[in-house]
Image (cartoon, rainbow, N blue to C red):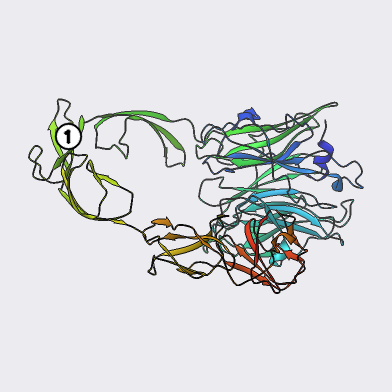
Amino acid sequence: MKHSVLILAFIFCLIPYTNVSQTFEFAKASPFGIQMVNGEDSSRLALKYFFTDQDDDGDLDLILFGLGEQDTLAPTIISSLRYFFEFQENIGDKYNPQFGPREKLYEDFDFPGGFGFALPSIGELTNDQKFDILMAVEVDGDYLQHPLIYFQNSDYTFEKNRCETWDLDPLSPNSFFFPELVDLDMDGDQDLLLSGYYGENYEGEGNTNAILYAKNIGTPNNPDFLGWFENPYGLEADSIPKLFRGGDLDLDGDMDLLALSLSGDEEVNVYYYKNEPGPDGKPHFSEPVALPVGFPVSQHKGDNYIFPNIVDIDGDRDLDIFFYHQEETDDTTIVTLDLYENKLCTSNEFIIEQTICEGESFEGYTVTGTYTDMLTAANGCDSLRILELEVLTNPETTVTQTICQGESFEGYTESGTYEDMFPTASGCDSTRVLNLTVQAISETSIVLDLCEGESINIGGQEITTSDLYTFYLISQNGCDSIVHADISFHTIDNSIFVNGNILSSGAGGSTVEFQWFDCDSGTDIPGANSAIFEPLVSGSYAVRLRDEYGCTADSECVLITLTGVDEPDVSKNLRLFPNPANNFIYIYNESGYKINQIQMYDRNGRLLKTESSSDILDLTFLPAGIYLVSLKLEGIRTSVVRKISVLR
């Protein structure tokens, strides 16, 4: 598989990297498990790469951007490109990175399409611990090029914005710029830097090289950009386009720049721009200095070093450099990510052995163990200090004791935590911690309301009658406990009185709940919830009672036969179907009497709906359950009641 045609179609320079004050040595190709080609899908070749703490665990993970299979039906090379993001988690640590297998990332990312092309740079623009992306470029119908900023949301999706959002003009057709997010003015936020050329035609004739800068004048949480400015802070575009990368290369606390260019004879040149701020504190970049030594050199045609990255990969506080290395022969292409390790900070390690007593500390450490600390020297490099700390334990005894009020334990008579120190041969103290609880003799009063027929056992005594009781009990800790109990057993008068066709309950009072019911069917009678009940039809009736204490009782059933009314039995000629039903139920009336009124009740007797004569009942407003339908017929005093079931 060969991707070089696609890669070099929109990369115009080969890029080695260097540093004026530091020494770099080749360490390894694709170290730490880095995978530039997906082992499961060789068509997914990484092109750019970024080191960032993607999972917020304190070490650097690897984000890979690249090209997948191209669309062979696309009209141009650019429009045929298919991009992807993938992720390798650092499963090692900050000082010893090791990257896990490649995983797909942001599969729904909205890459530029059509004649646009994707070339990302990442950085944090909104102070939310998630990286955002500066992307080149999206092309409109007039072939104007629009640099894009993607803000990453909390759910790891991205919001795409053209740079016109901040009044930044689009680029002319056929331009080509490398985007870079860099804090060029060292004010704590990321600025926009573009390096490349304004295009005039597809053949590259008439191209104008340029360096464009947009200053971030917003807040850490809400960026705002002012630009474009050409040739910022002393930078000047010359006859050869350059790609810039930023970093504090001389360790003086400001942002320096490296620039990489490709001359006409394909010789790679590397330049160092030292930042020498003026009296006003603004950055100013000196004349570039060529740095020809210390970095990889192409061995033959097709041996290319592109897209470097400056990062402290091993946590030693100096900057290491990676190069994207593509070596192409007649029948194969090998892609690696080569590490050139910074030798400014060499290994410096020393060991300290220390013994302390428990309760003391040594430089903040209080527990036996081996501790490693990175200490920063004057040159900015780290030294590794290994502390072998032994903490001699103070023999400590914890005693938990409970006594009753009036007793004592080793002279202590009040609840509390007491420490007594005793010297030992090692010179460390032995500590006895006494947790003493003094239980007071408790005396409580309770009121119990029970129902007739119930009982309660207190202290082994079975109580069945109402009275005032005093109990002398022993608590779990063995101390006395006195309980005064006012115990009442409540009865309900479940007598029932008959006066003609009217039934009344012997249980009075506003605290009693009543529910009259049909003894034959066991069905509660809707709305019959008072002490007095007048049946509408002959039958056997009783009342269910409940008082304020939760005690319940049913009365005896009383047979009521209504007299003086000679009515036909029409109930057999009324049918409701289907039953159970879902949304509607039909009334089949063969009684010969007109239905004047239909009422629907829930199981608790609450009236839900009243309507005039109808052949169909609408049940759509009811949840699933059991309901009662009361049918009132013209000329018939007695209503016919039917129970229905509603299904959902």
Is 428 in front, or is 645?
Answer: 645
Q: Is residue 446 visible?
A: yes
Callout 1 secondary element: strand
From the top left corner, tell me how far across and down residue 80 is, in percent: 86, 45
Q: Is residue 443 left or right of residue 497?
A: left
The total of numbered circles placed on residues is 1
Q: Quadrant of residue 615?
A: bottom right
Is 195 in front, or is 224?
Answer: 224
Q: Is residue 574 visible?
A: no
Which residue sits at x=20%, y=42%? 475
Is 457 in front, or is 129?
Answer: 457
Q: Is residue 160 left or right of residue 21?
A: right
From the top left corner, tell me how far across and down residue 348 is, in percent: 43, 31
Q: Is residue 280 left or right of residue 46?
A: left
From the top left corner, tell me how far across and down residue 227 is, in percent: 68, 65
Quadrant position of the N terminus in the picture: top right
Is 235 drawn above or below residue 402 in the view shown? Answer: below
Which residue sits at x=88%, y=53%? 205
Q: Quadrant of residue 405?
A: top left
Q: Amino acid at mark 1?
A: Arg
Is 608 drawn above or below residue 551 in the view shown? Answer: below
Which residue sits at x=62%, y=67%? 608
Q: Which residue is mark 1?
A: 432
Q: Quadrant of residue 304?
A: top right
- Give the class, few, some or many, for how many residues have Cα within 10 Å of label 1's Cα (few <14, many ≥20): some
Is 591 drawn above or below residue 523 in the view shown? Answer: below
